[in-house]
Image (cartoon, rainbow, N blue to C red):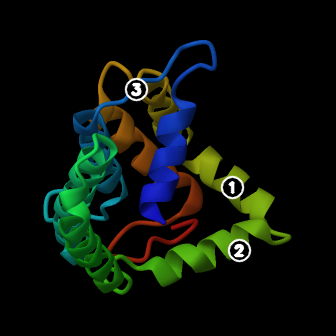
């Protein structure tokens, strides 16, 4: 869920006229930024952040395996299967520490009849931060980490979701 939100933000940061060539290193930095932006207490990351660090390392192995497979190395199938299993197992362990239930609840609330007023209220309450985040997102090609952090922070402020700790809509 977090990765999907991050990738959507990352993909919107580039204009339609500009070809997008993203390296694995840029995606890693962007993902780290999203996690930092969504972290309830960035100076003391919790279990979700630490778990995603492990997941990201496992996902990097899967990506490397797929790249080898696409290059014609068929001997990588066993490693791909093992690495994919490890990544999926790690992702499953993150459901509780990453507070995904709260994210789902907040998305359902935002999709409901009060969603628009909640988004407007959250925007008005955090407009300076959100506007700064949007400016940073427009420059993703210059700094993937900063872009990811801005995307995570914007999601946190608009949706009212953080990893590890519930974050009130209108605290």
- Name which of mark 2 and mark 3 comes first in the sequence: 2
Of the two numbered discs 1 and 2 in the rendering, the one whose residue sits closer to the viewer: 2
Percent across and percent down for residue 29 are 24, 40
User: Which residue was labeled with disc 3?
Assistant: 140
* CA distance for labels 1 and 3: 24 Å
Q: Are marks 1 and 3 in contact (CB under 8 Å)?
A: no
Percent across and percent down for residue 59 are 26, 60
Residue 52: in sight, yes or no? no
- Name which of mark 1 and mark 2 comes first in the sequence: 2
User: Which residue was labeled with disc 2?
Assistant: 109
Identified at 14% across, 57% down, the residue is 43
Q: Secondary structure at mark 1?
A: helix
* CA distance for labels 2 and 3: 30 Å
| Marking on residue 119 | 1
* CA distance for labels 1 and 2: 10 Å
Task: Determine whether 23 is above or below 48 in the image.
Answer: above
């Amino acid at each position: 869920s977090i990765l999907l939100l991050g990738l959507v933000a990352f993909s919107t940061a580039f204009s339609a006229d500009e070809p997008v060539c993203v390296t694995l290193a840029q995606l890693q930095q962007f993902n780290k930024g999203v996690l930092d932006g969504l972290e309830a207490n960035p100076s003391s990351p919790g279990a979700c952040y630490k778990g995603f660090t492990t997941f990201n390392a496992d996902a990097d192995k899967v990506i490397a395996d797929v790249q080898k497979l696409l290059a014609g190395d068929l001997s990588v199938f066993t490693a791909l299967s093992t690495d994919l299993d490890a990544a999926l197992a790690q992702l499953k362990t993150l459901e509780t520490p990453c507070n995904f239930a709260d994210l789902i609840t907040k998305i359902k609330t935002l999709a409901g009849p009060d969603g628009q007023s909640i988004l407007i209220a959250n925007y008005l309450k955090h407009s300076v931060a959100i506007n700064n985040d949007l400016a940073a997102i427009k420059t993703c090609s210059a700094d993937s980490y900063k872009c990811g952090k801005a995307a995570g922070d914007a999601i946190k402020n608009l949706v009212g979701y953080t990893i590890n700790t519930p974050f009130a809509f209108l605290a």
